[in-house]
Image (cartoon, grey):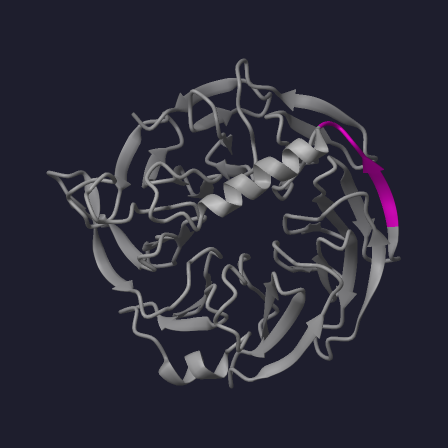
Amino acid sequence: MRKKFVFISIILLAAVFLSGCTGAVAWPGLSASGDVAYLANTNTVYAVDAKSGKQLWKFSGESSGGIFSFGKSPNMYITNPVLTEDGLVIVLDSSSKHIMYALDPNDIDLEKQTPNIKWKFSEVKGLWIAPPLVIGNRLFAPNSDGKVYVLDLADGKSEKQAIEAITVSESAKEEARLWAQPVTDGERLFVTSLDKSVIAIDLKTYDVLWHKDLGGAVPGGAALGADGMLYVGSLAKQLERFDPVTGAHEPVLDTKGWIWGTPVASGDNLYFGDVEGYVYSFNTADGTLNWEAQPDSAITASPLVYGDQILVATESGGVYSFNADGDFDEWYKPADKGKAYTTPVVAGDFVLVAYLESDYYLVALDAESDEKWTFSGK
């Protein structure tokens, strides 16, 4: 079972780089704002009304020739869309086109039923994999070329000086280095990397404050605990705690498997899963493990804190509900096939779960885990 998962993961992640091959598949990106969900599913980004499941619009890039256009690589949208305070939707084309789009959902092309592009940015050498982070009027966007690009949200113009200052890796030969959205404590930006490192960047000067190496690659992001410390999981099967100011760090918990997703903080507790199917609750106040449990199969998504529950999606497609003591129940199971690798989100009154290898892309569940609608993108 575990070997099968690793094989599937390699195939899915490798698909990101098969930009010249139509029909490439990777797990979807999902986000929500209010009653609207945004789903990045392979060649298309969809906006979906969370109340009804009705498609509001879709975006498939600028090419009018479709994904099978001769001599053109297909678009690939797999990264969580990012919403800005002024209503823009930032989507990333993870193909070799290297394009970031800022879409304006208030400016719809009625004929195509797609939002118009306010600006785009493509001055990068690597693939877009990590969702960018909005801080004020700036967008911090990690790219697989080893740099974090700083863009003005008003027009998408890059701060050229910042691009040179925030160089995470000097080697341009290794691809897919930065895969996770950065996190900030208001003074520093924290970036994780597949080259087994964590980097802190000064938000005012763009100087790299510290760059620390871990024992394994870090595909997920960092999490800030209630204790003010930074927590990072890695493929070294460890959770590490960092001093955000100095970068001093130490392992605080060994896990059964690779930590793929980003830990989630709620109060003094930190929740995360691993690819062996274990879920962990770690107390940041006293540095101890509250509990661990193995409900099902591999976990790549981050948990979702939903009221007094912790919801966890697994590779088998099941979604499990945990209470504060670590007791769990199967909260939802698809009637048919489907694999869940993406973190569920709350949109309006519902929890939305994205599926791969299913008859539908998205399902909406109420507080009792009853299906309210499904979305197939057709």
Q: Is residue 257 magenta?
A: no
Counting from the top left corner in percent of width and height, residue 38 is at 39, 41
In the picture as drawn, the residue positioned furthest to the left comes out as 111
The residue sitting at 73% across, 35% down in the picture is 277
Q: Is residue 335 above or below residue 241?
A: above
The count of marks equals 0
Q: Quadrant of the C terminus?
A: top left
Counting from the top left corner in percent of width and height, residue 308 is at 70, 36
User: Bounds of the magenta span?
Assistant: 289-296
Q: Quadrant of the N terminus?
A: top right
* Residue 68, image quadrant: top left
In depth, the one of 363 and 276 nearer the eye is 276
Position of 214 with respect to 17 (left or right) is right
Majority SS type along the magenta span = strand
In depth, the one of 218 and 228 nearer the eye is 218
Answer whether residue 312 is visible to the viewer in this image. Answer: no
In depth, the one of 124 and 70 nearer the eye is 70
* Residue 313, image quadrant: top right
Q: Is residue 372 above or below residue 184?
A: above
* Residue 294, image quadrant: top right
Position of 284 with respect to 168 (left or right) is right
The residue sitting at 69% across, 35% down in the picture is 3
In depth, the one of 165 and 333 nearer the eye is 165
Counting from the top left corner in percent of width and height, residue 111 is at 10, 38
Answer whether residue 55 is visible to the viewer in this image. Answer: yes
Counting from the top left corner in percent of width and height, residue 157 is at 30, 73
Position of 245 with respect to 349 (left or right) is right
Q: Is residue 328 above or below residue 89?
A: above
